[in-house]
Amino acid sequence: MAKKQHTDAPVQKNDVITAVIEDLTHEGDGVAKVDGYALFVPYGLPGETAQIKVLKTKKGYGFGRIIERIEESSERTEAPCPIYYQCGGCQLQHMTYDAQLRFKHKQVQDAITRIGGIDNIPVHRAIGMEDPWRYRNKAQVPVGTRSDGHLKAGFFQKRSHRIMDMESCIIQKEANDEAVQTVKRIADQHNIKAYDEENARGTLRHVVTRQAHTTGELMIVLVTNGPDLPHKKDIVRDITEAMPNVTSIMQNINTKRTNAIYGEKTTLIWGNEHIYDTIGGISFAISARSFYQVNPEQTKALYDKALEYADLRGNETVIDAYCGIGTISLFLARKARHVYGVESIPEAVTDAKRNAELNKLDDITTFAVGEAEELVPWWHQANGLQPDVFVVDPPRKGCDEKLLQTMIDMQPEKIIYVSCNPATLARDLKILEDGGYAAKEVQPVDMFPQTNHIESVTRLEKRAEKSV
């Protein structure tokens, strides 16, 4: 039975209409209006007039596809990637980079105004890259089987789970491309079978590569469906002969029927367990499963801004919630009296302690495993810990509500909020504003050019108590 179309919509499936793209969604799709009815149109840009075929209608909105552009935006550019319109990795290659930065600034501004209800906070122009290509230092590529039986490796096709065989990704470092292609070729030569999701058979699931920006060291992680990797010694020999800059080859074992890339167990099969990188004079030992920002150039811009907003004078106590491997903590520690880092992932805390020792900052840093909303109040009650500055860098879902209340209760002079999601940032800012903090300014930083993602740093200060 065919699905019923919504008769209250002014357009129906398969209609072809002419309309103007008026706006963009937060994902970067164009928005056209027909008698107030919204049509979401991928790759449309504001100001463009286009012939649009209606693909689907719902009660309040529908979806369409551009058949022909009648008037083009001056912000449109030719996407340089040959598979851009099939691949799901990038969303904005059809937009000039200046336009991308304006779009991302507007994303942050609109979220803070509409969701946070805050309309008096300056949102600065997004800090962009001089060259917004070839910036990613990490690739995570699924492996599959081509129709001729040989291996393929590449990103998933847009809105599907089909792997697109890919020779190059122009937002990845060239060394990552080379490593993925080398592993694919060598695994093929040794008749290694790709993992098949449907029957959970086969060996090689993913190839993960990481390159250190300053040292050039390269790590390859082979994610396998079980501990057995046939011809392991031969594969290692062939990889290291083909790529002398490889300094680490790891094997991660993932036997679960899941979309998660990594399993629980990771072992060293050749070289070193870590690669080493430096950002802003701070050195980091990076393990196979370390969280480490993928754009080192923009990471420095992001952390420099967090350090500027913290305005440390050398006598402050700082808490860094969601501290990961200690990246922001160590930037702050050089200017603070003591930094306390909290992280729920034990391996990350181990890395953070190692990185503190590596930079001779272990005497002024303390890292602990736990949930910040549980551990920080305990520190406060048991040890009298009182932070002057509270730094948070949460995942996309934002801060836990208990942690927000913890910050409000502990009354630090400043809160520095590093965010990767404008919507949850805005939601959390509203809670902090209601709790007695004033958001002073927001600086977006474009960590992921050609995609719809944007990071930002917000400076909040405790409001002075009103005299009665």
Image (spheres, grey):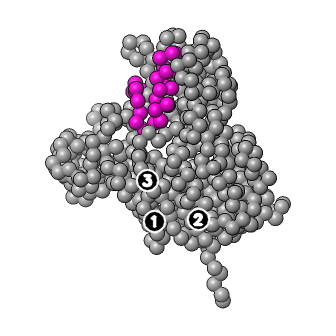
Residue 398, horizontal then vertical, whole percent: 57, 54
Residue 348, horizontal then vertical, whole percent: 68, 42
Disc 1 crowd rating (10 Å Cα; few below 14, some 14-19, many 20+) is some
Q: Residue at x 48, y 70 (%)?
A: 121
Residue segment shown in magenta: 160-187
The residue that label 2 is drawn on is 309
Q: Is residue 66 left or right of residue 127?
A: left
Q: Give the alpha-carbon distance from disc 3 to disc 1, as whole Å.
A: 15 Å
Dot 3 or dot 1: first in sequence order is 1
Q: Is residue 98 something that shows in the picture? A: yes
Viewer-nearest residue: 352 or 436:
352
Q: Secondary structure at mark 3?
A: loop
Which amino acid type is marked by label 1? Answer: Val
- Residue lying at the far right of the rendered structure: 382
Q: Give the alpha-carbon distance from disc 1 to disc 2, as whole Å.
A: 14 Å
Which amino acid type is marked by label 2? Answer: Tyr
The residue that label 3 is drawn on is 128
- In this rendering, which labeled residue sits more in front, label 3 or label 1? 3
Dot 3 or dot 2: first in sequence order is 3
- The image quadrant that residue 161 belongs to is top left
Q: Is residue 105 left or right of residue 389?
A: left
